[in-house]
Image: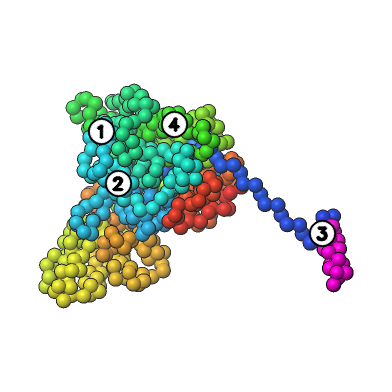
């Protein structure tokens, strides 16, 4: 036995030697595992609120060299990336980005929703236990991430570094900053009564000195009386349509000019509120982000750990709501965002060194065109008066079951029914659901209705729409009915502008651009990707575990 073992060992050695010498039929040597690259010193997550990927592709030839074009040329860009849930609004989209979770887990089911117990409207980031620092705070103002039921990438980074990493978020909207920041980050948001950026008592009792210095400088006041006019030559806006916007001069239907002032002639809340629909809001947001980089020494953490900065630029959403993504204003605003980002990247290059930074850009949702524009393209498009729709539903259910007020509340696309009242009157929940769905499906502009009975019992099909709407529904707090409008229709009673919130591609398809010299493989990627993939991908680069509820995949195809 000993001789056989000796012969066998000699044979193995011989095979290994042949392999090392490169024999043609030799056993291949095991590959040496690649050493993971050191984590970036700073991760910057940029969100352009309300930016459809279609706009990035349509206007990319007009971008300058240092902003979006830099990301497209030097980074990885996904053309088929989606906010993959069925209710595409700001709060839900921001919650998904760094949690990697869908609404059925993270609990943010809208900007506002109905509390199923009190039947009162709830704002996604309201918490009356906290107030803004040095600013007026109303009961429904967004002050804390209390309603976010999951952790985020920033929370995991804090945990992994013993709270040494700094996580700072900035936005023109409170929900944009708060939901990116998670439970342990620090959020700052634009105050539309004063034009300041401020935090809340959830995060601290007093602003640090760098914030106080920024506020004392009053940068928001420099735009009083200034005008937003087209950045590019008129010929660049030739294909744009401006519904309801008066031209600045005869023969120039795609020109525009907006001045920022107040009716009182003073620097007041009227003026600061108007800034939200201008590129100046985004300029201020990025200026505050620069102050945060310096004030918090981001990217140069003395503990030698990575930092995370998330910046949500809010104005594009306001512009698209008012004028539509087909407008010259939206077109021009994106060009201005591009130039602003170029300046911000140049600053990061000088301050931190872009070789030490990973930058990611995405959006919380896309946008449909204004219905009047869609109609001109021979599309079936309209606004649906939600109040009338729900009133008619309640009246129908009363007629069917001889029970009044079976509809208790609504925040479309969610509608709440009174199951207890129904059962008291010998109406089964399944019957009530089915009757409501039948009625709604017959109404003009309605494509689909999902009921609590279907959603709880696995009765929703596996179509893309069904999958997205299941993800958007939270068993504890969502409505008993979820109503989906037809493509290019949306819930709204106004007579101008447009809105988002649907499971259709124009609302779900958003840009996903990632740039980082030592970590990201540049190129255009056509693979399907989701915004929930961001958190696990960045967690891999930061060498931390992904957030607990993250369901996305690591975008391994882009990693070096």
Task: Please report whichever mark, 3 or 2, sits nearer to the chain's N-terminal start.
Answer: 3
Residue 55 appears in the figure: no
The span picked out in magenta is 1-19
Question: Of marks 2 and 1, which one's residue comes earlier in the chain?
Answer: 2
Q: Which secondary structure is most common in the magenta stretch? A: helix
Mark 4 to mark 1 CA distance (whole Å): 22 Å
Question: Residue at (19%, 54%) from the top-left corner?
Answer: 120
Asked whether disc 3 touches disc 2, contact meaning CB atoms under 8 Å apart, the reply is: no
> Horizontal and vertical percent for residue 162?
47, 42
Of badges 2 and 4, the one in the foreground is: 4
Quarter of the rendering containing residue 292: top left
Q: 256 above or below 78?
A: above
Give the structural element (helix, strand or loop) at label 1.
loop
User: What residue is at 20 percent from the left and 25 percent from the top?
Assistant: 265
Label 3 crowd (10 A; few <14 / some 14-19 / many >=20): some
Q: Which of 493 and 16 is in front in this view?
A: 16
In this figure, which residue is indicated by the disc labeled 4? 296
Nearer-N-terminus badge (3/1): 3
- In this image, 272 relative to 159: left or right? left
The residue tagged 3 is 16
Please report the residue visible at 76 percent of the width from the left and 57 percent of the height from the top. 29
Q: How crowded is mark 1: few (under 14 residues within 10 Å), some or many (20 or more)?
A: some
Disc number at residue 104?
Answer: none
């Amino acid at each position: 036995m000993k001789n056989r073992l000796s012969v066998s060992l000699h044979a193995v050695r011989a095979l290994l030697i042949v392999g090392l010498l490169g024999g043609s039929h030799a056993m291949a040597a095991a590959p040496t595992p690649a050493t993971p690259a050191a984590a970036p010193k700073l991760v910057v997550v940029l969100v352009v609120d309300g930016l459809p990927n279609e706009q990035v592709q349509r206007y990319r030839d007009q971008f300058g060299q240092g902003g979006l074009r830099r990301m497209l040329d030097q980074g990885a860009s996904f053309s088929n990336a989606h906010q993959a849930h069925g209710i595409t609004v700001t709060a839900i989209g921001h919650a998904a980005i760094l949690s990697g979770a869908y609404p059925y887990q993270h609990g943010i089911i809208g900007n506002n929703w109905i509390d199923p117990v009190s039947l009162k409207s709830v704002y996604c980031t309201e918490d009356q236990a906290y107030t803004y620092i040095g600013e007026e705070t109303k009961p429904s103002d967004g002050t804390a991430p209390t309603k976010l039921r999951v952790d985020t990438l920033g929370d995991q980074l804090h945990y992994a570094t013993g709270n040494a990493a700094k996580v700072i978020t900035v936005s023109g909207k409170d929900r944009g900053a708060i939901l990116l920041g998670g439970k342990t980050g620090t959020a700052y948001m634009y105050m539309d009564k004063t034009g300041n950026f401020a935090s809340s008592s959830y995060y601290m009792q007093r602003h640090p000195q760098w914030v106080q210095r920024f506020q004392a400088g009053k940068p928001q006041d420099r735009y009083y009386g200034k005008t937003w006019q087209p950045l590019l030559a008129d010929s660049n806006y030739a294909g744009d349509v401006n519904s309801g916007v008066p031209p600045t001069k005869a023969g120039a239907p795609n020109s525009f000019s907006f001045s920022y002032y107040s009716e009182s002639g003073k620097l007041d809340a009227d003026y600061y509120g108007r800034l939200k629909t201008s590129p100046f809001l985004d300029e201020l947001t990025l200026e505050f982000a620069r102050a945060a980089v310096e004030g918090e020494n981001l990217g140069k953490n003395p503990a030698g750990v990575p930092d995370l900065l998330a910046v949500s630029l809010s104005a594009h959403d306001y512009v698209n709501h008012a004028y539509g993504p087909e407008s010259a204003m939206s077109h021009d605003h994106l060009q201005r965002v591009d130039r602003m980002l170029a300046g911000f990247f140049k600053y990061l290059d000088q301050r931190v060194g872009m070789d030490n930074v990973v930058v990611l850009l995405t959006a919380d949702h896309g946008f449909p065109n204004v219905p009047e524009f869609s109609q001109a393209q021979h599309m079936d498009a309209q606004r649906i008066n939600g109040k009338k729709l729900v009133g008619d539903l309640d009246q129908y259910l009363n007629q069917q079951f001889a029970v009044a007020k079976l509809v208790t509340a609504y925040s479309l696309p969610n509608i709440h029914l009174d199951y207890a009242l129904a059962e008291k009157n010998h109406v089964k929940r399944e019957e009530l659901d089915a009757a409501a769905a039948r009625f709604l499906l017959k109404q003009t502009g309605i494509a689909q209705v999902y009921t609590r009975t279907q959603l709880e019992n696995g009765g929703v099909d596996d179509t893309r729409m069904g999958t997205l709407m299941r993800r958007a529904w939270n068993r504890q707090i969502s409505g008993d009915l979820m109503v989906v409008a037809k493509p290019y229709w949306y819930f709204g009673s106004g007579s101008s502008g447009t809105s988002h919130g649907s499971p259709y591609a124009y609302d779900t398809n958003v840009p996903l651009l990632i740039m980082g010299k030592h970590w990201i493989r540049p190129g255009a990627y056509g693979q399907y990707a989701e915004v929930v993939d961001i958190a696990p991908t960045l967690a891999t680069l930061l060498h931390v575990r992904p957030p607990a509820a993250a369901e996305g995949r690591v975008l391994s195809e882009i990693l070096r």
